[in-house]
Amino acid sequence: MEAKLTFKEYNENLKQGRLSGLKCSGCGEVSAQPRLICAGCGGSQLETMELKGGGAIQTFTVNFVAAEGRESEVPYIVVIVELDEGPWIMGNLAGVKPEEASMDIMGRKVRLESTTVFAGDKYSAGEIARPVFSLV
Amino acid sequence: MRKVVIAGAGMTRFTGKQPRTAIELFGDAASEAINECGIKPKQVQALFMGNFMGDFEEGQAHVQAFTADYLGLAGIPANRYENACASASAAIRDAFIWVASGQFDIVLAGGAECATKMGTPLATRTFAMASDSRYEYAAGVTFPGVFAMLAHLYAKRYDIPLETLKNQLYQVSINSHYYGARNPKAQFHKELTLEDARKSPVVASPLQLADCCPFTDGAAALIIASEEAARKMTKKPVVIAGVGQASAGNLLSQKEFLPRIRSRELAAEQSYKMSGLGPKDIGVVELHDCFSIAALIALEGLGFFPYGTSGRAVEKGETKIGGKIALNPSGGLKAKGHPVGATGAAQAYEIVRQLRGECGERQVEGARVGMTDTLGGDGGTLCNMILRRGW
């Protein structure tokens, strides 16, 4: 067993606007986060791939109460997107005013528009990138 | 495997900010449990203690060793369990297994938390540490946010208009406060009106403050003993008839299974199988209503109602005392409070008191079998217990 994609590589790629994933040679399951073993079949033959960034919104929330250090960000929309390749990913949504977001956006097609970086705080291990989607 | 019982149970009043330490709170809960067994503290052979965030609350990691010493138990093995909100339940389950194995006869298990010492911003930050720091927190998700997304998904999946679901969720919280007001140890002794619920601020849409459990300080502890050892301690031993525990990856990894919680269904299956009992046998349940929507999801995952129908069941009164299943007569996490690392033990405390018939005006008459359900993180840990009268 050998890690084909580390968090550092994934995170650096995402900062550059590239979404990395892993595809299982055994069952074809795609993961949008680094992992050692396939969640679908338990196989260890995973290959890196680039995810295209297209998908559909599965669910969302508009967050009004921030965690310590992120007070200036609220309100903001958090979305879970099912990527066209299959896996689910969490990010933010641009182009929709948080006050106007409703369940109508669920099921809407989105594409990866950009990435932004959570600068990290005294508890986190450095910068962490996240995808920002926009409605297609 | 030997038969294992809960011989004694103790719990502090759950509160908002208060001056005492987690060790002292646990000491109070342990004293109640030990005293009602009529044993000496020195007879306890091991301590299994849930504690989620002592590191941030009091600058105190490794609290279990100092807790053992505070109780005069220095020398015994002492473990801390960090399974997010399910910490105490994981501790109790392990106590069950160690006693069942014959390794120990008497174990003290439970948990303590002083979450309010952090204040809301830091507590919101540290609670979010129980979701995935790499793939979830960067997007700014908080715990209300996790369950808010499940609420939207629930409405969509089961084709329930959001307004209808919101009204059902208000009723969940109203019921919790009704019972909490009748539980002397609950954090909130105030009933919640529909008007107040509707007016409460939005935390993470669609969830409002009235949908969210509070931050809480408190502790709860149980004496877990072999049936034989317990004979000298109590006339009303509560048998641990079944336990279950399961894990899951982050919320994203659970994808199409959501809004169901796979780890709950795996754990419940274990509990039902071990006990030989099913949902129809359970008269009272203390389940993980950290948010109102979480109660609906849990009622269905445990098998009490078909998927997508528990909100209607709540509106029809089927989850009240005297209904199909008595839901959270303690007031639940919503009104009793949620001192994270103690919550599972507090759930078991309520079931023990219910089975013994000691709950006064919130008593579920004739309760013979009860169940606990504790969810950690966004489903990363799930523990159940089925408890029944042993007399």
Image: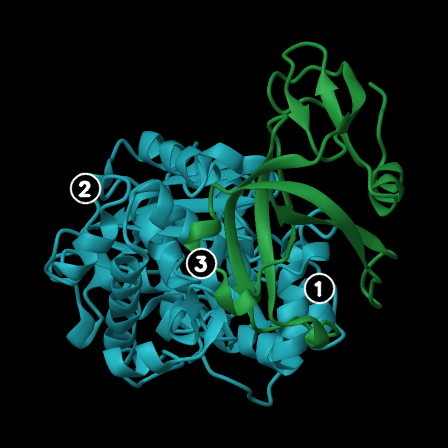
Chain colours: A green, B cyan
Name the residue that disc number 2 marks.
Answer: B281
Q: Residues within 10 Å of mark 3 (few under 14, many from 20)?
A: some
* Label pair 2/3, CB-CB below 8 angstroms: no
- Residue at screen point 17% across, 40% down: B280
Left or right: B82 in relation to B384: right
Residues tagged by mark 1 and mark 3 found on one chain of the structure: no
Can residue B107 be seen? no
Q: What is the secondary structure assignment of the residue under circle 2? A: helix
Task: Tell me the quadrant of the picture where the N terminus of chain B can be found.
Answer: top left
Query: Which three-letter amino acid code belongs to the residue tagged 1?
Result: Ala
Residue B260 found in image quarter: top left
Identify the subunit bearing mark 1.
Answer: B
Q: Secondary structure at mark 1?
A: helix
Please tell me which residue is depicted at 85% across the width and 24% down the height of the picture.
A4
Could you say where residue B300 lies in the image, as x and y percent from the top left? 30, 44
Q: Nearer the viewer, residue B142 or A16?
A: A16
Badge 2 amino acid? Asp
Q: Chain of mark 2?
A: B
Q: Nearer the viewer, mark 1 or mark 3?
A: 3
Residue A62 numbered tag:
none
Image position, residue B353 (x, y; %): 28, 65
For the residue pair B389 and A115, the one nearer the viewer reads as A115
N-terminal-most mark, 1 or 2: 1
Image-based side of B120 in relation to B226, left or right: right
Horizontal side, residue B7 vs residue A52: left or right: left
Callout 1: few (<14), some (14-19), or many (20+) C-alpha neighbours within 10 Å? some
The residue pinned by badge 1 equals: B65
Residue type for callout 3: Ser
- List x then y, in percent, for residue B354: 24, 62
* Mark identifier at residue A102: 3
Q: Does mark 3 fall on the same chain as mark 2?
A: no
**Residue B348's image quarter?**
bottom left
